[in-house]
Amino acid sequence: RNVLHEVISRLADVLEVDRGSVLLLGHNETLDVVAASDEPDLARVSVPLAQYPEVRAVVASGQPLVVEDAPHHPLLGEVAPLVAARGIGAIVLFPMVVEGQVRGVLILRAVDAHPQLGAEALGFGRLLAGVLALTLDSKRGGEVHQQTRRVSLARFDAERRLQALARFRDF
């Protein structure tokens, strides 16, 4: 079972929301949905960032956002009818920040238009978003480290070969 899914599922249960998701900023104005509380076998799915004005707002501000009465909230604009059709009453978003940059968003959705999330619940969501950001970034960093190691080894090998060929240069 996916650990990220398990974390998001438990968060949704504890905060009594209907769905939790982890969205990472992708390339070319996309979001990569990497985990969802109600989809244990979710494969990474890319969606256009343009369809999520609330996520754009969090990415721009770097601050959490609570969107109560989402189907009527002015921030959602043209997507408000889609939000209403999906039965989403409220959306709570936490930026996943690493080194001052938003790398993704932890997003919670509730059917209730006015979920009872106190300061403690919001603080917990913010904390978890930070932990997830660092965890996912270190995982990505591990991949970067492996790639850097491969490049370094290839460079070392190429330099060694050049040194071996250098002795024939004078003939």
Image: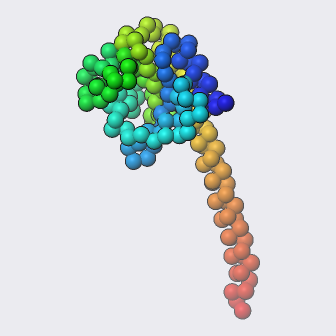
Residue 122 location (% of width, % of height): 47, 14
Q: Nearer the viewer, residue 106 or 48?
A: 48
Give the tally of numbered discs: 0
**Residue 123 visible here:** no
Q: Quadrant of residue 88?
A: top left
- Give how far across and how far down residue 66 sits, in percent: 38, 18
Please state, as top left, top right, bottom left or bottom right, where the C terminus lies in the image: bottom right
Picture coordinates of residue 59, whole percent (x, y): 39, 32
Q: Residue at x 69, y 76 (%)?
A: 162
- Whether residue 33 appears in this view of the structure is yes
Q: Which of the 4 image quarters holds residue 84? A: top left
Q: Residue 54 versus residue 166: which sits nearer the camera?
A: 54
Q: Please tell me in which quadrant of the rendered image residue 78 appears.
A: top left
Q: Residue at x 64, y 31 (%)?
A: 2
Residue 62 at x, y percent in the picture: 40, 29
Tell whether 71 sits left or right of 23. Answer: left
Question: Up-down: is 154 above or below 23?
Answer: below
Question: Looking at the picture, does residue 98 appear above or below residue 6?
Answer: below
Instruction: State the residue lying farthest toward the front.
Output: 85
Quadrant location, the N terminus: top right
- Residue 152 horizontal side relative to residue 42, left or right: right
Picture residue at 59% right of the left edge, 18% below the top: 10
Q: Depth check: 140 or 171 in front?
A: 140
Residue at 25% x, 27% y is: 77
